[in-house]
Image (cartoon, grey):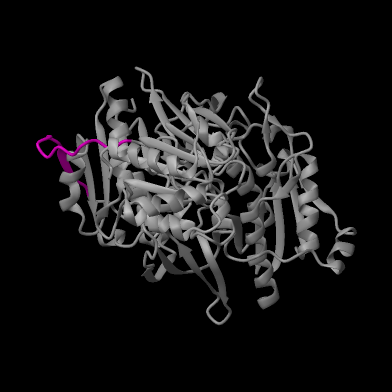
Amino acid sequence: MAKNIWVFCEQRDGEIQSVAFELLGVARELAAKTGEKVGALLLGSGVEKKAKDLVAFGADEVYVVDDKNLGYYVTEPYAQAVYSLVKEYEPNVLLFGATSIGRDLAPRLSARLKTGLTADCTKLENDEDGNLFMTRPAFGGNLFATIVCPNHRPQMSTVRPGVMQKLEPDYARKGEVINKTVKFDASKFAVKVVEEVMETQSVDKIEDANILVSCGRGVKDVAPAFEFATKVKGTVSSSRALVDAGIMEQPRQVGQTGKTVRPQAYIAFGISGAIQHLAGMEESEFIIAVNTDKGAPIFKVANLGIVADAQAVLKQLNKIL
Amino acid sequence: MKIIVCIKQVPNTTEIKIDPVTNTLKRDGVPSIINPDDKAALEAALRLKAQCGAEVVALTMGPPQAEKALRETLAMGADAAYLLTDRAFAGSDTLATSTIIAAAVKKLGADAVFCGRQAIDGDTAQVGPQIAEHLGIPQITYAQDVEYCEKKGTLRIKRQFEDRYQTLEVSGLCLITVLSSYAKPRYMNVWDIVSQDEKEIGILTFADLEINPAEIGLGGSPTKVKSTATKQFDKTIETLELDAEQAANAIVEALKQKHLI
């Protein structure tokens, strides 16, 4: 019988991605309900030394496939490696980050394993029998659907980065590292990597910020927002409107088609709060909203709501700080 | 070269309303469009048609009214269009859908399959890779650029990640999912608008395909919708009407209280 909760732990250039730790966090919660183990899959070339981090963040078992074929991320070798592990150990649940890697690999595997896959989940729950309830936004966040996969195993899901809580790492935790070798069928490797090019991040990473100073349509001049953000050691983020208008860069966008963030403080200036936007920031610790429209939906999620002109408030903030 | 382009007719989600009582979509009066990523995939195929005379075939699965979307692909320059439609297909999840489309691709034959990266109504990005797996062909997703090298007979693809890109090369049958940022799709042209009228949309039903009925439709879908809900907000706070000076003071005070500044 299928058993245990597995997390595909994405790494890039040997660095475990934050979403992997987040998934281990939610996997622990699920495992607490069923008494299952949390298994971490670590695939790559020269990555074995990272296994202890996965244990610290909640894995009971780390399955390592360290192989030259897994240097660059390419679908087929990764699919072959995960497939062989799943076939050998038959996990009950298999989770991926909903990244450009997870969303490439997971559907390929779901078809190979002939099981169901739920995309871009924002909530995972389970029952004592190990059935997974996967909740995801649909139709631009207007609706939430809870999906089940009753008769097929593993139950597969990709999970939105930034949504689940990672645990505090505990390097005293005990876990087992299991090194596996996979027999690759290289005749299926039809895709050749000509080059891989890093794109320099010219923009601050909004998902890592403690304070986000977020601008919407109500901010006509964004320069004071950057000034204020610098003063409070925060980062500037944006609603979709300003990205579409070409005023803000896409990596700053919060929301359904942008990023999910949960900073210590999210200060929304001139953002009305379309449901797609709220979906990306409502989990923030403390939300301050400034908007001229008293009926703006952003006030429904704010801890401190201020009806005022955002531009004027920004100007005043820069004056007093 | 024959390229099958998989497209989906979707409701324009920016105009979607949910019935608060039944939690279902109000479809009435919501305009349907070709999914934006799929349109970019069609554009990529039409550019290869211009470059090397590729034959471009549009394929969709949906109710009979999806014919409208196929007519639009013909008016943009597709050479032929097929509609997969059957009651037996209804209720299919992504895996079951990909099973049906893969069977149709097999029947029609192709040298390459182009899809959009994801549809704006489901946002799953799953059907493309699942089709590729059923066909046993390589997939390249998140394509930001697609070039055909006639001399080598290979496709060269710029594959986008969050923090990097790869340049990939593939020869032989493959499936590519295209990002809408790849290219602005061309408009329908007058000549093709007129001539598409004379073209027949091919209809493919369950009977035309080699599929195991246990693997399609609602019954053949491994995932099931257990429940749906509209968004609920539980925070209720006081909203203060302040002038700029008071507002700035309140914000600074709040950040200080939280020890953030």
Direction from residue A299 to residue B17 in the image, left or right: right
Rendered location of residue A157, percent (x, y): 43, 37
Q: Quadrant of residue A291?
A: top right
The residue closer to the viewer here, A115 or A33, is A33
Work out whether residue B122 can be spotted.
yes
Is A60 left, or right, of B217 in this rendering?
A: left
For the stretch drawn in magenta, the main secondary structure is: loop
**Quadrant of image for the N terminus of chain A:** top left
Q: Is residue A176 magenta?
A: yes
On the image, the x and y values in percent for residue B190 come to 86, 67
Q: In terms of depth relative to the viewer, which is nearer, A93 or B232?
A: B232
**Residue sitting at the far left:** A172
Q: Is residue A255 magenta?
A: no
Q: Is residue A113 visible?
A: no
**Residue A196: image x %, image y %?**
37, 69
Placement of B41 over or under A102, stated as above or below: below
Q: Tell me the residue at 56%/59% (across/down).
A: B179
Question: Where A25 sits versus A101, above or below?
Answer: above
Question: Is residue B233 or residue A111 the one in the foreground?
Answer: B233
Q: Is residue A13 above or below residue A84?
A: below
Magenta part of the protein: which range?
Answer: A165-180
> Which image quarter: residue B91?
top right
Q: Residue furthest bottom?
A: B151
Residue placed at 64% from the left, 53% from the top?
B105
- Indicate left or right for B220 with B51 as reference: left
